[in-house]
């Protein structure tokens, strides 16, 4: 036998229940997004490396060490997208979609980051991202939070906590950065290696350190929320007031800074304690400077991305999803002359009953082995077609999940049989 070839570490195959959970999340999200009038965009997975270094920031974890970057055949530096916002902004600018118009869009698909694989952290993972361009008021920040809350409801996911914060304006952040650096410098010998490095490059990230040893130092730090500019403060108060009015619970987390450079004003995360260390299932915020930063006309923007794998884990752990059967009706064939009538019958059922999964036994086999497969498929009914049935133009119907007597039904009565309210195939 030849040597097996394995998948790349941190890049998973999805099948069975996780694959179903994935589809459920996407289809529910699409339904909710449609309710709010959002449009889907489909974007490339590969972009010029420069797009990410310029937007996400040179001194972020993603750009410093997590990108899958390679040279194209003509020497251009390309990267697999580590997130979707940068590409979405590029697409909006390049296609002229931001001229005097508001855009409310979403996308989904794989993202790539060379992180240490562990529960909830993979090298290929999937996000659904939502972005709004051209609106600067707090109302749209609120809409995004409401929309995400509605999705958790639709999925039946409980126990998510909404954390929010404001990062203020670029200027307020720059001023605060100085205060923070001078505070943290007093403890420079107690800072861990990451924080030492970040003190020079990206000190705000220290606030969101996952190292418990940093917690005490961080707790005493000046708070960005106390250093906000007047407009940002007002904006944030309106977000909080609307959430209060709409009955959305939240906590203000002054250490929520988000890992990417481009955020300002409102930032938020939906967090669970049920997935261990990787508890953030959805994260986002306002990024009013980004469009201009990557070559467009200044346009306010706000968005979020949710991690599909983490939501899948929640749906499965909270038993909000169970494996759906692969068949509702399973056709068992006995005898050589039954193949064609069987195919005709299956097609007729699929035409008339599109809501049912109609599976025809394939690969032959004894009566017994076909019934075993029918049972395993989860189907509610087996339809048995033997030579006698074909001659008489009937079919035998056997309930696989109840004690009901088997029945013989004429071909032209079959659809009527499955359409009766008492026939329960689910
Ligand atoms: P974290 O703090 O968990 O590393 P992040 O700030 O790097 O998250 P974002 O860039 O904001 O994450 O991505 C949005 C969401 O995508 C995260 O909240 C998470 O649910 C998901 N996500 C991010 N990185 C990964 C990964 N490597 N594997 C699986 N999901 C991920
Ligand atoms: Mg990360």
Image (spheres, rainbow, N blue to C red):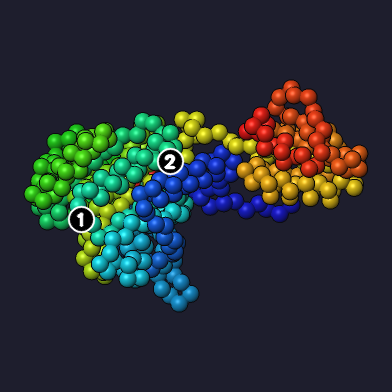
In this view, the mark in front (2 or 1): 1
Say whether residue 426 is visible. yes
Which residue is identified by label 1? 136
Q: Nearer the viewer, residue 158 or 192?
A: 158
In the picture as drawn, the residue positioned furthest to the top comes out as 403
> Is residue 424 shown above or below 230?
above
> Is residue 72 shown above or below 118?
below
Q: Nearer the viewer, residue 115 or 141?
A: 141
Measuring 71% from the left and 38% from the top, which residue is drawn there? Answer: 416
Tell whether circle 2 marks a residue whose Cβ is less than 8 angstroms from ligand 1.
Answer: yes
Q: Nearer the viewer, residue 2 or 85?
A: 85
Gap between marks 2 and 1, in whole Å?
Answer: 30 Å
The image quarter in which residue 78 lies: bottom left
Residue 62 numbered mark, or none: none
Say whether residue 214 is visible. no
Measuring 30% from the left and 43% from the top, which residue is drawn there? Answer: 145
Helix, strand or loop for disc 2: helix
Helix, strand or loop for disc 1: loop
Q: Earlier in the sequence, mark 2 or mark 1?
A: 1
The image quarter in which residue 54 lies: bottom left
Which residue is identified by label 2? 310
The answer to the question of whether label 2 and label 1 lie on touching residues, with beta carbons closer than 8 A, is no
Q: Position of residue 148 (x, y in %)?
A: 35, 43
The image quarter in which residue 296 lies: bottom left
């Amino acid at each position: 036998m030849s040597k097996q070839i394995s998948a790349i570490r941190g890049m998973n195959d999805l099948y069975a229940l996780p694959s179903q959970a994935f589809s459920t999340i996407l289809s529910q999200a699409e339904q909710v997004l449609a309710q709010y009038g959002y449009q889907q965009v489909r974007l490339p997975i590969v972009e010029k490396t420069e797009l990410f270094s310029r937007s996400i920031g040179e001194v972020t974890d993603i750009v410093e060490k997590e990108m899958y970057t390679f040279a194209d055949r003509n020497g251009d530096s390309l990267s697999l997208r580590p997130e979707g916002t940068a590409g979405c902004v590029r697409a909006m600018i390049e296609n002229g979609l931001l001229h005097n118009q508001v855009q409310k869009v979403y996308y989904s698909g794989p993202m790539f980051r060379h992180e240490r694989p562990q529960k909830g952290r993979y090298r290929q993972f999937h996000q659904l991202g939502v972005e709004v361009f051209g609106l600067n008021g707090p109302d749209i920040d609120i809409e995004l939070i409401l929309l995400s809350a509605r999705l958790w409801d639709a999925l039946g996911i409980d126990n998510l906590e909404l954390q929010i914060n404001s990062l203020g304006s670029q200027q307020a952040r720059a001023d605060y950065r100085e205060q923070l650096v001078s505070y943290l410098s007093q403890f420079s010998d107690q800072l861990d290696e990451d924080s030492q490095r970040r003190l020079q490059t990206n000190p705000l990230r220290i606030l969101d350190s996952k190292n418990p040893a940093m917690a005490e130092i961080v707790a005493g730090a000046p708070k960005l929320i106390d250093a906000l500019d007047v407009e940002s403060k007002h904006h944030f108060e309106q977000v909080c007031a609307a959430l209060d009015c709409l009955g959305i619970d939240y906590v203000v987390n002054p250490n929520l800074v988000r890992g990417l450079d481009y955020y300002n004003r409102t930032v938020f995360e939906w967090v669970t304690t049920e997935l261990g260390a990787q508890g953030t299932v959805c994260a986002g915020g306002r990024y009013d400077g980004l469009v201009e930063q990557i070559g467009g006309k200044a346009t306010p923007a706000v968005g979020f991305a949710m991690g599909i794998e983490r939501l899948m884990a929640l749906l499965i752990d909270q038993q909000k999803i169970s494996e759906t059967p692969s068949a509702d009706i399973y056709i068992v064939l006995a005898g050589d002359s039954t193949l064609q009538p069987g195919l005709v019958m299956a097609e007729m059922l699929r035409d008339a009953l599109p809501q049912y999964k109609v599976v025809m036994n394939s690969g032959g086999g004894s009566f017994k082995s076909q019934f075993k497969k029918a049972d395993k498929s989860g189907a509610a009914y087996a339809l048995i077609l033997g030579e006698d049935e074909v001659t008489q133009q009937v079919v035998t119907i056997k309930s696989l999940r109840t004690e009901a007597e088997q029945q013989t039904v004429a071909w032209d009565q079959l659809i009527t049989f499955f359409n009766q309210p008492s026939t329960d195939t689910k």
